[in-house]
Every structure is written in C-alpha cells, then in structure tokens.
Image: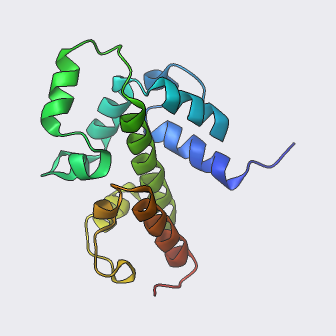
Amino acid sequence: MVAMSCFENDVTRTYLLLGGKRTIHASIETALDAHDLIVRGLPLTALIHLVNETPMLSSGDTLEKAIGISPRTLQRHKKEDTSKPLSVEQSNRIWRFTKILGRAIEVLGSKEEAELWMGQPAFGLENRKPIDLLASAPGAEVVQDYLTRIEYGIYM
C-alpha cells in the first residue's frame, strides 16, 4: 500500500469539511481531483454545508473575508438555480479557506479552537487575524506556515 502524501490528507480533510460526496456528488481523492473540481466549480451545496457547519462564517463580515462572498450574495445564490456551480474564483477561495480551517483543526485539536484562533490576532502574524489574511494566496501561505510553526512549537 502506498502512503498518502501530506497534500492528499489535506485534500481528503477539505473534501470532508465541504460535505464530501453528499454535497459534491463526486469522489475527490487527489490534488488533481481537487483541481478538476475547482475548475468545474464547486456546487453551491458544498458552500451551504460549510456555512451551516462553521459558525464563524455567520458572524459579521467573516464570510466575505474568508471566501469573498457576502451573506447577501449567498442568499441570492440560494434563491437561484442551486445546481449551477460556483465560479472558479469562488471555488478556489472556498477550497483555500476550508483547507486552512482543516489544518487549524488538526494543529489546534478541535473545530471550535480553530475557529476561535482564526478570528483572533496572532503574535506570529504581526497581530493580524488569520481570517483577514485569506483574501490572497500569499496571505494564506503565511497562515499555513504559521500553523506549521505552531505545530512544531516555533511561534515567532
């Protein structure tokens, strides 16, 4: 049996946080599967599942900071054709947020702790909130790197 790469663990964890086969209607097992899904567009049901299961996304402007979708836009999407996939940009931001949330859960031990951590200023991020850095790929990389430092006990 071939060992699963670290990224494939991230893929599986992210896929499950988005509702898995129940919301995505396909098996996603590798990074290439995830890429193909994002290019096709995530189904709205995966975003709805994520929002329903992640309380921090329902407070203030967190949904827009994390994913780039306002609560009003989400409501409009729900009223329209829910089978229409989200855009590549929206899908990419949803996947990126969910991947980082999954990693934070792994490092910090619980979903509640991960959500709390994402909304609090972090010393190792120049007192910025991790959630505020997810609007860009470089910001998300900084958060990912910081989670790795936390995992290994290096906070500066």
Identity of the residue drawn at 27% across and 37% down? 52
Front one among 17 and 109: 17
- Residue 32 placement (x, y as % from top left): 65, 35
Q: Quadrant of the N terminus?
A: top right
Confirm whether residue 108 shows in the render: no
Confirm whether residue 105 shows in the render: yes
Identity of the residue drawn at 30% across and 60% down? 131
Left or right, 135 with reference to 152: left
Is residue 130 shown above or below 46? Answer: below
Identity of the residue drawn at 34% across and 66% down? 130
Left or right, 60 with reference to 23: left
> Which quadrant would residue 92 be assigned to in this image?
top left
Is residue 3 shown above or below 124? Answer: above
> Which quadrant would residue 135 be assigned to in this image?
bottom left
> Which quadrant would residue 49 be assigned to in this image?
top left
- Residue 108 placement (x, y as % from top left): 45, 67
Front one among 5 and 64: 64
Identity of the residue drawn at 45% across and 42% down? 95
